[in-house]
Image (cartoon, helix red, strand yellow):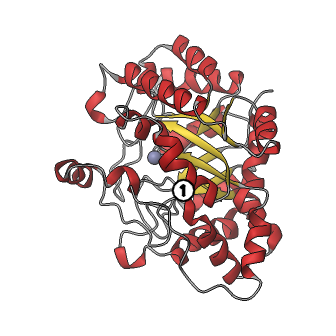
Amino acid sequence: MTAPQSPTVNAAQPGTKERIDRLHAGGIVDFHFDLPMHLYEQRERENVFASEILPQLEMGNISVAVAAVYVEDRYVPEMSLRVALDQIARLYNEADACPRVALCKSYRQIQTAREAGKIAFLLAMEGVEPLGTDLDLLRAFYELGVRSIGLTHARRNAAGSGGLFAPVGSSAEGLTSFGRDLVRECESLGIIIDLAHINAAGFDEILSLTTKPPVVSHTNARRFYDIERNISDRQIKMIGERQGVIGVNSVLVSPRREDCTLDRYVDHIAHIADLAGIDCVGIGFDFFEFIFNQWPEARKRELEEKLTKPHFIPGLTNHSHAANVTRKLIERGFSDEEIEKILRQNWLRILQQTLKD
Ligand SMILES: [Zn+2]
């Protein structure tokens, strides 16, 4: 991995740097980061987090990151539970070795960490394969700190079906009875239910089963990238009506490489704000290049065949580039108040409303 680079996109206007610094002073909340998977893959090495990831988070003024456990296809089903537990153990070990971060389980702990100038991590699970069909394991993962759960990735599992990386063809079926039980149990425990990846039928069903503001941690508008893994205008409005928040993903902003730009990233933010309101849009970077680049060619090809070919946005490939988004939001005429909502306040409100103390 190369050292983080300073943002280089667009020469700053006089005063812009100061304005960005001011806007970043309260920190940025990123609601989707595949860190546990990366730490697991790099488990033969020590201090991966402190030496490679932390400098980027610091340069980008990240103050809260939702770290999602994700188990790849090759471990499913037999190894799912074990790999998930190993990923969590890796995160704990690396966090313990680094006084700059705190693994948090409540909104109060997140606020305490932020006040102490630490980076708060919240554990999440992307796809419930580690649970099998055992609701008791949900309680065990809750005790380990898991506070946000997306029922599926792209594949079908015991809880439901994911949206395909294609414009049509996802399962028309909603959740399974296990999936419905899981949603109810998450709400009662104080676990956020993340609607990222779920198919359209599952999306509607989760909204009908829950009362809290809904969360889509990392997604993009189908308006600009029309695949069922992303969300439609109808879904964006539904999230807005329930005062939920949608995190904008940096990896699926367009199927065309030439359109994968910072401007297109901000187009997604602006589109969601137009349809659902400025209180409903946040950041869910889903940075992936640092993982992808370490894969052998055969594995990259497998991902492209199964899902899609990722196009990374120049100037937005890791957390050290966060200021490029802020600069672009300024350029596009967003006010300070709007930018602060996008960068952190909307997500902090959700965390306060959904987590228990
Ligand atoms: Zn994802």
Left or right, 222 with reference to 146: left
In the displayed structure, 115 sits above or below 160; it is below
Residue 99, quarter of the rendered image: top right
Image quarter where the C terminus lies is top right
Dot 1 amino acid type:
Phe
| Residue sitting farthest toward the top | 136
- Residue 310 place in picture, x, y as percent: 34, 61
Q: Is mark 1 on a helix, strand or loop?
A: loop
- Residue 54 place in picture, x, y as percent: 56, 48
Viewer-proximal residue among 85 and 258: 85
In the displayed structure, 272 sits above or below 81; it is below
- Residue 167 place in picture, x, y as percent: 36, 59
In the displayed structure, 267 sits above or below 25; it is below
Q: Check disc 1: other Cα within 10 Å, few if <14, some if 14-19, many if 20+.
A: many
Residue 337, quarter of the rendered image: bottom right
Would you say residue 338 is visible in this rendering? no
Image quarter where the N terminus lies is bottom left
Viewer-proximal residue among 49 and 346: 49
Q: Which residue is drawn at 76% across and 59% down?
A: 279
Left or right, 79 with reference to 116: left
Viewer-proximal residue among 187 and 115: 115
Viewer-proximal residue among 281 and 65: 65
| Residue sitting farthest toward the left | 298
Q: Ligand 1: does it lie within 8 Å of the C-beta at label 1?
A: no
Q: Which residue is drawn at 74% across and 63% down?
A: 24
In the picture of the structure, the residue carrying the numbered disc 1 is: 285
How many labels sit on residues? 1
- Residue 313 place in picture, x, y as percent: 44, 69
Would you say residue 292 is visible in this rendering? yes
Q: Which residue is drawn at 42% across and 77% down?
A: 259
